[in-house]
Amino acid sequence: MEKESATHQMKQDEADIPFGELSSTGEYILAEPDWTAAEERAAKRKIDFILLPILGLAFFALQMDRGNIGNALTDTITEDLHVTTNQINIGTQLLSAGIVLLEIPSNVILQKTTPTTTNAEAHNVS
């Protein structure tokens, strides 16, 4: 009985702590969502319909840019820019190497800086 009352008191104390702050045990308090599963599905669907076409278009533009360098080399780009074909190839290789080398670290950073941790840091600053 006494243990239940202590647990109830701790839950009541944690309920007074705003979202994103540490509890007495040193853990972040996660608030219960105030939306239904259907509302969450609708919001995700809406975001998907907005973001996926934009991301698809961005990926298409990146691929178009990568592939277009071959077409530019057959034209007069080297004369127009006063560079050699080797310099253009090195630039293309550096771009590809940068994408390959930075893709995994950027994904790791994105996983570690979730909206929850970002919001918690923002609330602690103000």
Image (cartoon, rainbow, N blue to C red):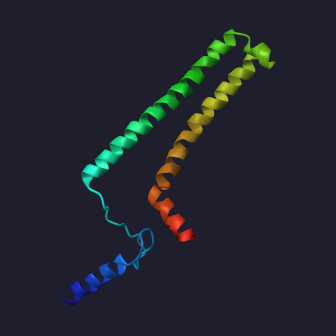
The residue located at (58%, 19%) in the rendering is 67
Is 2 on the left or on the right of 48, as rendered? left
In depth, the one of 31 and 2 nearer the eye is 31
Residue 105 picture location, percent across and down: 55, 46
Spot occupied by residue 90 in the image (x, y as percentages of width and height)? 70, 25
Q: Who's the residue at 51% across and 26% down the image? A: 60
Residue under the image location 56 percent in, 22 percent down: 64
**Picture quarter containing residue 18?**
bottom left
Q: Is residue 56 among what the camera can see?
A: yes
Residue 114: image location, x then y, percent = 46, 55
Percent position (x, y) of residue 21?
A: 45, 72
Is residue 83 something that shows in the picture? no
Compare residues 100 and 126 and report the one nearer the observer: 126
Looking at the image, residue 116 sits to the left or right of residue 109; the answer is left
The residue positioned farthest toward the left in the image shown? 1
Residue depicted at 44% across the width and 60% down the height:
116
Residue furthest right as drawn: 82
Quarter placement of the N terminus: bottom left
Q: Could you say which quadrant of the image residue 25 lies in?
A: bottom left
